[in-house]
Image (cartoon, grey):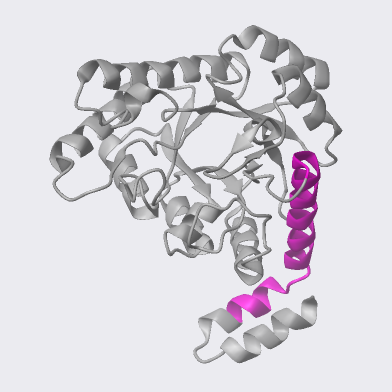
Amino acid sequence: MLNVKCSINAAFLGKCQDRFFAYGEDRTLEQKLDLVAQIEGADGVELKLPRDLEDPAPAKELLAKHGLPLSAVNVDLKGKPEWLYGSLTSTRPERRAEAVALLKRGMDIAADLGAHLVTCCPVADGYDYPFQMDYRAAWSHFIDGIREAAEHRDDVRLSLEYQPTDPHPHILLRNVGTALYVCEQVALPNVGVTLDIGHSFMAGENPAEAVCLLVRDDRLFYIHTDDSTGGGDWDLLSGTMHFWHFLELLYYLETVGYDGWLGADIFPRQFDAAAGFSANIRLLKRMAAIVARLDAAKLASMMRSEGQAAQTFEYLSSVL
């Protein structure tokens, strides 16, 4: 059975805001980690740089206090006004250098706190209009910046999270294909991909297929669980929109032997944040339990046969 090792993205335990409303309440890092420690099934926590880790010393003490492993350092390359027109792809060398320096700092902190993994979703690097961006220069800057950061130390993995839109209509790192392209161009073993399930749906993908593509090149470093209608980055509870796709995702994660973290990006619009993360963990574990009841050999035989979709879903539904 798949080892469902769940991590909580602490950013969602503080005050969150979309275009229209604010949700939750401001919490200190100590308050957020106290809350994570109370969430049943939470095995670790993901912290953001700079928000949570401007000074990593208190975080180190608090993690030790609660016995919480750090799953990843999430480096935020979108929050500064200077990066409105790009961080790694900015036309200004000093702004690109600042972005690379923050990635390097995140890698140092990750090593010090025992995570040895940095995840980053570079959504500032995109564009809104035709003729706005020099694509050749932007892609060169992006790949060069990732390579420089990854070369900083080979004992920490740098995991890139793709997302097709928001805050730009077009993000450079927009789907599993562009993510794998960057990995191939950088050509370093410590550069890989964070698969955010909701973002995969946004990109018109099937996350289970994305898993298989990433695993072929040994580039699946980290996972963010959440769900989406496909039309936006809604960060909904896992399996609430795409139940069958989540079963297939968990089936393939078990099949390929994934033993990494299942992080969670759940936006607390309609419920208390801690309650939402608790529900997400239970949903994942219950879906994983369903997958564990499947006859893997029988299912594999059905998938290798043509014209078996009706019989396959008859069998799958009988296991529920």
Q: Residue at x 43, y 57 (%)?
A: 213
Q: Viewer-proximal residue, 228 or 40? A: 228
- Residue 56 lies, in percent from the top left, at 61, 11
> In the figure, 273 relative to 103: above or below?
below
Q: Residue at x 48, y 63 (%)?
A: 209
Question: Taking the image as drawn, is residue 162 in sight?
Answer: yes
> In the figure, 107 relative to 312: above or below?
above
Q: Quadrant of the C terminus?
A: bottom right
Is 172 within the magenta? no
- Residue 30 lies, in percent from the top left, at 75, 18
- Residue 128 lies, in percent from the top left, at 27, 47
Q: Residue at x 80, y 22 (%)?
A: 67
Q: Viewer-proximal residue, 44 or 15? A: 15
Q: Residue at x 70, y 25 (%)?
A: 26
Q: Is residue 315 left or right of residue 17?
A: right
Is 298 within the magenta? yes
Residue 12 sits in quarter: top right
Q: Is residue 274 left or right of residue 82?
A: right
Magenta stretch, residue numbers: 272-301
Q: Viewer-proximal residue, 255 or 125? A: 125
The secondary structure making up most of the magenta span is helix
Residue 286 sits in quarter: bottom right
Q: Quadrant of the N terminus?
A: bottom right
> In the figure, 66 relative to 22: above or below?
above
Residue 150 sits in quarter: top left
Question: Taking the image as drawn, is residue 212 in sight?
Answer: no
Count of residue discs: 0
Q: Is residue 280 left or right of residue 199?
A: right
**From this viewpoint, which residue is outermost toward the front?**
20
